Every structure is written in C-alpha cells, then in structure tokens.
Amino acid sequence: MKITLTPIFTTMVTAHGKTRSYLHRFKITESPVCPCSNGNQTVEHIIYDCSKLRNERRKLIADISKEDHWPVEKKVSEQIPKTDHPFHKLN
C-alpha cells in the first residue's frame, strides 16, 4: 500500500501540529484539554480516545476489517494484538 505524505499525515506521525496539547506547549492556546473534555488533545487521544470521534472510529474499524478490502487470510481486527486500551474494546 502506498501512503501519500500530506501535511495532515506528517502531523499525525510526528505529533507536531495543530492539537491543543502541542499549541499549549508554546502558549498559543490557554488549555491543552480536548473539546470532548476527556483528556488533553494529543494525537494519541484523537486516534484512540476522543469521544467526539467515536462514530468515525467505529466506521473506520468496520471498513478496514472487511475481508474483501484486504488480500489477507484473516480480518485486520484479528491480526491486531489485543490490549486493555479502550480502542480494542470497540469491537
């Protein structure tokens, strides 16, 4: 799979971007707290925990877990090691 390098992708991978936590480090925003009020708005929080993105996260997991999208024997969700992280409890 080819990944296109975009500013958004680079921001997510490097965690140097327009998250409240990052901007708060430089005193650009008053607070690092996410608008969902469930923690600081970091890249990890946005991907795994933000309640405002819960529906989008579920749709993405459902879409990438479909066997016909991936030429593999198992679904993607079956290949990801399970942890106690709330992200893994969405399935």
Image (cartoon, rainbow, N blue to C red):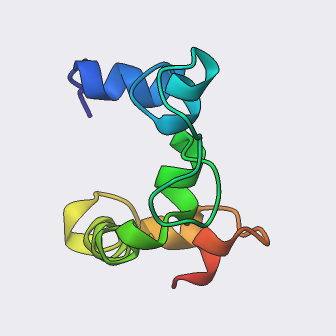
The reply, left or right, for residue 66 in relation to residue 19 is left
The reply, left or right, for residue 67 in relation to residue 42 is left
Q: Residue at x 53, y 82 (%)?
A: 90
Q: Residue furthest right?
A: 84
Is residue 15 visible to the viewer in this orientation of the structure?
Answer: no
Is residue 73 visible to the viewer in this orientation of the structure?
Answer: yes
Q: Residue at x 21, y 63 (%)?
A: 69
> Residue 24's spot in the image, x, y percent?
57, 27
The reply, left or right, for residue 41 in relation to residue 89 is left
> Residue 30's spot in the image, x, y percent?
55, 35
Give the image quarter of residue 54: bottom left
Give the image quarter of residue 19: top left
> Residue 15's spot in the image, x, y percent?
53, 25
- Using the image as rendered, state which of residue 89 and residue 55 is in the foreground: 55
Mark count: 0
> Residue 17's spot in the image, x, y percent?
42, 22
The reply, left or right, for residue 88 in relation to residue 11 is right
Quadrant housing the N terminus:
top left
Classify 12 as above or below 78: above
Q: Residue at x 29, y 69 (%)?
A: 56
Classify 15 as above or below 44: above
- Using the image as rendered, state which of residue 28 and residue 46 is in the foreground: 28
- Using the image as rendered, state which of residue 37 and residue 30 is in the foreground: 30
